[in-house]
Amino acid sequence: MSTKILQVKPKEQLSKLNRRQRLKKENLFYLTGSSIENKSVLLLDDVYTTGTTLHQTAAVLYEAGAKKVNSITLAR
């Protein structure tokens, strides 16, 4: 079952930032109210550049009690 539990605050386009700027960005992800405590979560990302998106989303999920977070990326 697929459920969208993460949202992202409005942001500037990351492709215009260099690696250092991307890594310094504040975490813009937040949960939408779904309980993920003790659940496994699979993140899907289109492109892995610096890993910031996956690291920030995983941090939010673990803070909310996720048991395990895995990811799949389509391109690097």
Image (tube, helix red, strand yellow):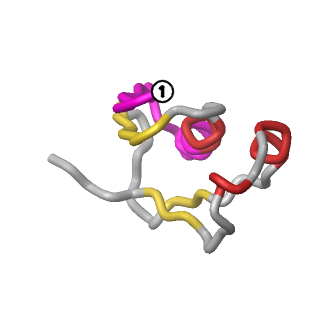
> Is 72 inside the magenta-drawn segment?
yes
Secondary structure beneath dot 1 equals: loop
* Three-letter code for the amino acid on which mark 1 is drawn: Arg
Residue 43 left/right relative to 22: left
Check disc 1 and report the residue beneath it. Answer: 76
At x 55% / y 37%, what residue is drawn?
54
Q: Which residues are magenta?
A: 57-76
> Is 11 inside the magenta-drawn segment?
no
Q: Which corner quadrant of the image does residue 41 belong to?
A: top left
At x 46% / y 38%, what residue is drawn?
47
Residue in the foreground of this view, choosing between 75 and 52? 75
Total numbered circles: 1
Residue 51 left/right relative to 65: right
Q: Residue furthest front?
A: 16
Vertical comparison of 24 with 67: above or below: below
At x 65% / y 32%, what residue is drawn?
50
Percent across and percent down for residue 42 are: 34, 34
Q: Which corner quadrant of the image does residue 55 belong to?
A: top right
Percent across and percent down for residue 67 are: 45, 28
Q: Which corner quadrant of the image does residue 12 belong to?
A: bottom right
At x 70% / y 56%, what residue is drawn?
16
Q: Residue furthest bottom?
A: 10
